[in-house]
Amino acid sequence: MTNKELQEALEAKFSSQIIASEELHDALIIELAPNDVHGFILALKEDNALSFGFLTLIGAVHYPDELNREFCVVYHLHSWKNAIRLRVKSYLPKSNPSIQTITDIYEGANWLERETFDFFGIQFEGHPNLTRILNMDEMDYHPMRKEYHLEDQTREDKDDRFFGR
Amino acid sequence: MGKIEDLEVINGEGYQLTTLDKAVALARSNSVWPLPFATSCCGIEFMATMGSMYDLSRFGMERMSFTPRQSDLLIVAGTISKKLAPVLKKVYEQMAEPKWVLSVGACASSGGIFDTYSVLQGIDRIIPVDVYVPGCPPRPEQIIDGVMNIHKLVKHEPMRRRYSEEYRHLLGNYQIEVTNADNDK
């Protein structure tokens, strides 16, 4: 199955849900509204022809300048049967970055969603245990958000003059 | 006995006299049992130091102790993330006195290149360090040099030090209690 065929199959079935689609780095990207993601992924998994049976990755991106589209949640799906990959994106506003969990579809989504919550603060509604997974428990912010410093803020030996700042 | 020439001794016909301090320190320094706390590439260099090529056992250190309770020297080799910091501190607290700490490499000493929210910026923020070994990672020769410096400290440490008020104050800075059994005497 090629990306073109996949795109046509998806357009035929979900034309009302798909906001945008494009092909980037040899993989098809589908953008959906947050409320449609769960049903879309479930349908893709249960569809016998498409059979996207494998969840490769869940991640997020922070675009601080895009108003009400600050957070993008990305799902990478893989169909072993058709040997094709698909990326599903959904944009969330910063005021309420929440989306329905897909742990009921893929068990493997559990840790991936915890990681995305840990680093970006995305709330996955219905997740059985949405707690930090990689960072220390005492951390009180989500470090991959752009408003926070990447560097450790407790160092006193770093003089800006030595770094050309 | 090993390097008796390092000590101030009185040699007589068939006997040698020295102070208890120095005899104990000599014995200690020639059988330091290390606990390797290796997390990354510095740990690989430490393994090379352990191996037959560089052979740390020449200095009475072939006995790696993977339990903190039976070790004298904590060798921290590698990046310590903030999440791992309480574990490292617990390991240090579980070691029996007297104990020493060798910080191997840039990461353990200062955070190294990982100046980031998730990495501890030097283990001396949570436990006292006796000797720092620079390098990223340091070569086995450098690690051996660090170990030699530890041996020098061990050899010249007065027996009272671990019971002193200064030592209690030092550990107090790290919110660690001195665990000598006869601490209060």
Image: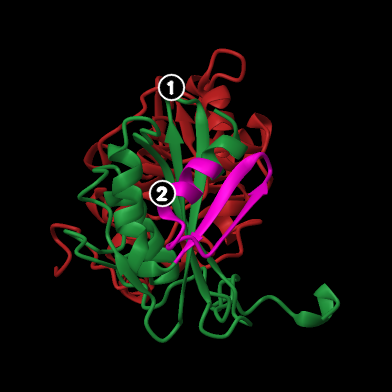
In this structure image, what is the colour of chain B?
red
In the figure, residue A35 lies in which quadrant? bottom left
Quarter placement of the C terminus of chain B = bottom left
Q: Amino acid at mark 1?
A: Glu
Comparing B114 with A37, the one in front is A37
Question: Can residue B7 be seen from the camera position used here?
Answer: no
Mark sitting on residue B13: 1
Say if the magenta span includes residue B167: no
- Which image quarter: residue B183? bottom left
Query: At 19% from the left edge and 58% from the top edge, which residue is drawn?
Result: B180
Figure quadrant of residue B31: top left
Q: Chain of mark 1?
A: B
- Whether residues under marks 1 and 2 lie with C-beta atoms below 8 angstroms apart, the answer is no
Residue A80, position as x, y percentages in the image:
42, 26
Q: Quadrant of the N terminus of chain B?
A: top left
What range is drawn magenta here?
Answer: A8-32
